[in-house]
Image: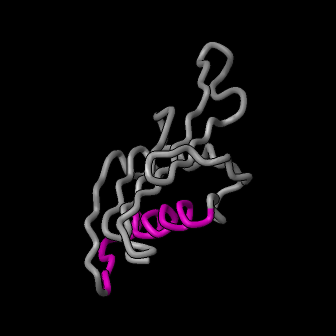
Amino acid sequence: MIIKRLILKNFRNYHESTVELNRGRNILIGENAQGKTNFLEAIELIAHGKSDRVKEDRDLIRHGASQMQLEVEFHGCGFDQTISVSFQSNCNKQIGGHTGPLGKTFKLNGVSQSQMKS
């Protein structure tokens, strides 16, 4: 599998970012706390359906946002494909913040897949 593009929206410290990746090696360069590990975590989340860095998936949504979305375009099995993951937090500020279960959507080539368990 060759990842071609990764789109991050309200994921961890990313507000919105699109990263085009080269076919060969790609090197992440940046200061501390700029999002290099978060970038790799996004790929892990898409590949495995969960992150090993958080206790609750809600912690993956950028502070102040109610939802996050990741999308990866890749070449695999002989053709281009897309996987997207989105988490929607139910927020009720009147009763103290986030309530209820986190809404999760996983799509392969635009078709919703059964939810993955965390």
Residue located farthest toward the bottom when viewing the structure as drawn: 25
Q: How many discs appear?
A: 0
Q: Which residues are magenta?
A: 25-48
| Magenta region includes residue 42 | yes
| Relative horizontal placement of residue 32, taking residue 56 as reference (left or right) | left
Q: Is residue 55 above or below residue 28?
A: above
Residue 79: x, y in percent?
A: 37, 69
Q: Which residue is found at the position 30% from the left and 53% from the top?
A: 17
Residue 99: x, y in percent?
A: 69, 26
Residue located farthest toward the front when viewing the structure as drawn: 78
Image-quadrant location for residue 19: bottom left
| Relative horizontal placement of residue 46, taking residue 78 as reference (left or right) | right
Q: Which residue is found at the position 44% from the left and 77% from the top?
A: 1
Residue located farthest toward the top when viewing the structure as drawn: 94
| Relative horizontal placement of residue 7, taking residue 58 as reference (left or right) | left
In this rendered view, identify the residue nearer to me: 66 or 76.
76
Residue 41: x, y in percent?
A: 52, 65
Residue 33: x, y in percent?
A: 41, 64
| Magenta region includes residue 80 | no
Image-quadrant location for residue 28: bottom left
Q: Which residue is found at the position 32% from the left and 47% from the top?
A: 16
Q: Is residue 59 above or below residue 1?
A: above
**Colour pattern of the rendering:** one colour
Q: Is residue 25 above or below residue 112?
A: below
